Image (cartoon, rainbow, N blue to C red):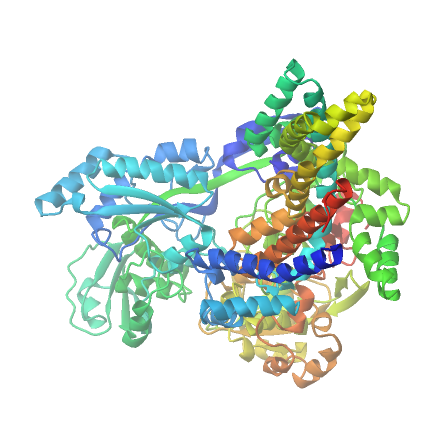
Amino acid sequence: MGLARFLARRAATFVPTVVGVLLITYIIAYSVPGDPVRAWVGEKLLNPEALERIREKYRFNAPWYEQFTFFVTQLLKAELEDPIRNRNVFDEIFERFPVTVELAIVGFIFLVAIGIPLGIIAAIKKDSIVDFFVRVFALVGSSLPAFVLYYYLILALFVYTRTTELAGVPLPSAQCRAMIASIAQSYPYVGPVVGAVGSVPMFGAAMCGEFGVVAETFRRLYLPGLALGLLNGGFIARIVRNSLLDALSSEYILYAKARGLSKLRVWGHALKNALVPVVTVLGINFGGLLSGAVIAERAFNIPGMGRLMYEAITRANFPVIIACTFLFAIIYVTVNLVVDILYAVIDPRIRY
Amino acid sequence: MTRISLYKAGVADIAVVTPARWKDVNLTPVDGHRLLLIIDKEKPRLTIQYVLLNTMREPFNIPEVRQALAYAVPYGTILDQIFGGLYTELHTIVPKGMFGYTEYGIVKYEFNEAKAREIIGKLKERGFDPGKYSITVIYNLGNTARAQIAALLQNFWTRLGFKVFVEVYSWPEFLDRVDHFNYDVALIGWIPDYLDPDNYLMPFVWGGAEFTELKYYKDVAPADVGKYVSKVERAVETEKFIVVVGPKGTGATYTGPTGKPIIVVSYVLDEAKTAKNWEKPVAFVTIGAAGWKDVPVSALVKLSRMVLDPEVRAAVINAAVRVFNNEAVMILLGQAVTGRNYGSWVRNMYYPLTAFARYDLVWETPDAPVRDTGVLGIKNDPQTMVIATIGWPDTFDPAKSYESFGWEIFWQVYSKPVTYRYEEIEPEPELAVAWAFSEDATELYFVIRGGVVAYDPWNGKTYPIDATDVLFSCWRVVRLNLPGSAAWMFSDFIDINASTVLTEEEFKQELAKGLIAVYRGKERVVRSLDELLNFFGYKGPTAGVVKFKLYFPYPPILHIFTTAIASVIPMEYALGDKYQAAIAESNNGKNPSAWAKYVIPGEDDPSYRLLKDKPVSTGPYYVADYKEGSYILLKLNRYYWNATLWEKLYGYKP
């Protein structure tokens, strides 16, 4: 099967997957007891007439499937509105998502920078004290409550040493943003791509040559990135270690050694073959980071998707929950697709 | 976590810190200064914490059971350990610091298990079996203080023989349960919207009863009580009066306390409306949150809303409060005290009771810490105030906002007709330079300050403000009637469509009949504009007069005009190119109902769509920038009508 057919087949599964995810999320939200509309309008005295109006608008007097259809239709027409802030849900998402993309990139860099070298070292130094520490690190990373790590990192690197900031998010200059917006509107094909990429503040700043903003972004986000890397890096290290050890015990490595290839080349062969499961896990992790790191975003005061979703859940904000889920579902299916394609790039034996 | 970190690092000058974290923060050194936590128990706040007992359910319909439960609450532990000293004891539903506060005849429920057991013991003699009842205490998820209180109640109430369970619910479900009386016992708190006991009496004490007639008679002889009521349902002794309540009629025989002047309150119950309220009761809306259906006390509550005589009003409120307390309808856990929490470099920080500090009146010492904020490259230096707080305003439109964060922003950004100076509790002129009432107090006149402009930072424009803008701003709140808004604060009391704008000539004609000006505790009948303005000590220009038509005389009406919903916005900004037509059709604000063509109810109204995201300014600050969930940047508004104040205070010209 060629890549084109593979892509077509996967694309065909996109729609049912996304709809399924939306339906399950909606049913869970719908099943939670309580009156969402009451939560939307706040805690003080009610105005029954206005309350009824909002109930009508969001189909709370209709059966659940009608309401679900309404939400999905509005979503697809890009007309679904956050009932609390009365903003189009996509406006909210487009405001938050670029920040999450930045955090995901920085977090991913730390994840890879911590996880892969540690995994390789642990494999090379198998059963040594180094290997032991990597395993302990993985165990601690997986079991440590995130907020504890965040708290101590903030205390050490913000409160005491001020190596980062905990407020705001660096943005490119107004001129830069205007220029990107203008390109996005002026050029039919390239423009929207430039606009989308440039909406991520660090990319936008880089496009305009405002590298100071890029540096500030790293300064702002390195701490949550490091925290995410520390929490998940151990797990990646374990995957790399085990996968590399599997590869090193393969016959082709024995053959390579027998042929007298240098140690470096042997390790290179082994590493490339060991990367397939690692890429899968990294892909899933990146997808997770793009869906917003809820606790990290709250702890480090980052106005991204994780916080948007958290706030939506606490106020039973169905439209925002649905819209965020829609985006997350698309991210996951896309990331999985990219991972599948990457398999073939990494391992030439894999063909579609 | 972030707030505390920003505060401890000196990035924030002021932070919202929950009591549980105060010990982590207090006295933290910052560049030779310290973070201060000062609890001022002498300055009570109006926030209360309480335990709702669902009086529509057994056994909470039995006053003695409620009293026993009230005695079996470890108040000391709750106040000192759980609330960290930030709350003080509270025994009456109208708390200390509020008009109508009384200690006369009030039972102070203190922790006394023996007394609680004694009461239950007496009930047992009458066949009451506490073991028959399962009591479920509910609270909202994430509120650790309430979780601890619930555990304490479970412990102590179980000792009385009840089966007690604790359940925690998400905020939406918790609200839903409280709204619809789907609970036994609920833990909640309350903050009033404006400075009046009505903000406690209607939400809690009122029993859902409506009346077609309510009257009072002062200084009635005991033998004459029967001339006004057919039956004495309640006779309550207050500090200065004895308040007697009963249905309108004749023939009642009074056998209650004597020795003080008697006020007789007679009522005619509106049975149809009352039955409707009780049919599907909604807490805080069709009945008080405790579901306590006491008709005579409801009559006192409703009467207290329209009595102008302060002595009678106080007595009526005291009577309602006393009955509510004596029958332990709710268990009151505590009243907040002032907790001052800011860096020692912050000066003149103050805490109004129902409003907020205005940050242009607060300053920092020249040696205040200097820190990068991380926001737009701004440094927090002595000229910049950084406040680390919780949440995010739902909207920037005062017509919808009904939460503290939003109202705090509006306090900085908009001027209202009246305001409070620092921590004072008497309304002071802001955009209204003077005011007066008609003799029956059903008409309120505001003389509007001249020379005021609103600043639109999004388009760099200014708009002149006059009486039409003031009326339009209030009218718009009622017209939009946005879900969850505080529109009721106008619509319950003001016939907004019958309100109107007057020219000064027209106002002079009204004045000629004699209007009553009330200011700083003084009252005077005024008959000319000069006399009125002199009474208020105002000499500057004016910009027309607004007459608000009230449904009934409502004593605290001025306090409502200090709140965020009375924020004055420029009509021209709100209506855009329709402004001129709207002005013409309303005959310059004489007929505000003509504006209905230009403002539609609900969230689809264009003016709401504009103002929810792009607020303008008639106050000391304007919103210069914001990023949702991250920061709001306020800058001093150089067009502020009182901008010279800063020059006087700081020698600073914006």
Front residue of B504 and B130: B130
| Total numbered circles | 0
Give the left or right position of residue B159, taking residue B536 as reference. left
Task: Give the percent coordinates (x, y) of residue B75.
Answer: 35, 36
Can residue B381 be seen here? The reply is no
Task: Give the percent coordinates (x, y) of residue B446.
Answer: 60, 69
Q: Determine the residue located farthest toward the right in the rendered image.
A: A209
- Is A80 rendered above or below residue A194? below
- Is B91 rendered above or below residue B544? above
Quarter of the image for residue B299 reads bottom left
Can residue B489 be seen here? The reply is yes
Q: Quadrant of the N terminus of chain A?
A: bottom right
Residue at 86% across / 40% down in the picture?
A212
- Is B38 rendered above or below residue B652? above
- Is A219 rendered above or below residue B406? above
Quarter of the image for residue B470 reads bottom right
Front residue of A232 and B72: A232
Quarter of the image for residue B277 reads bottom left
Task: Give the percent coordinates (x, y) of residue B222.
Answer: 19, 62
Task: Give the percent coordinates (x, y) of residue A30.
Answer: 46, 59
Residue at 36% across / 57% down in the picture?
B289
Residue at 64% across / 64% down in the picture?
B432
Give the left or right position of residue A19, taking residue B91 as reference. right
Front residue of B231 and B76: B76
Give the left or right position of residue A63, taking residue B62 as reference. right
Residue at 79% across / 65% down in the picture?
B462
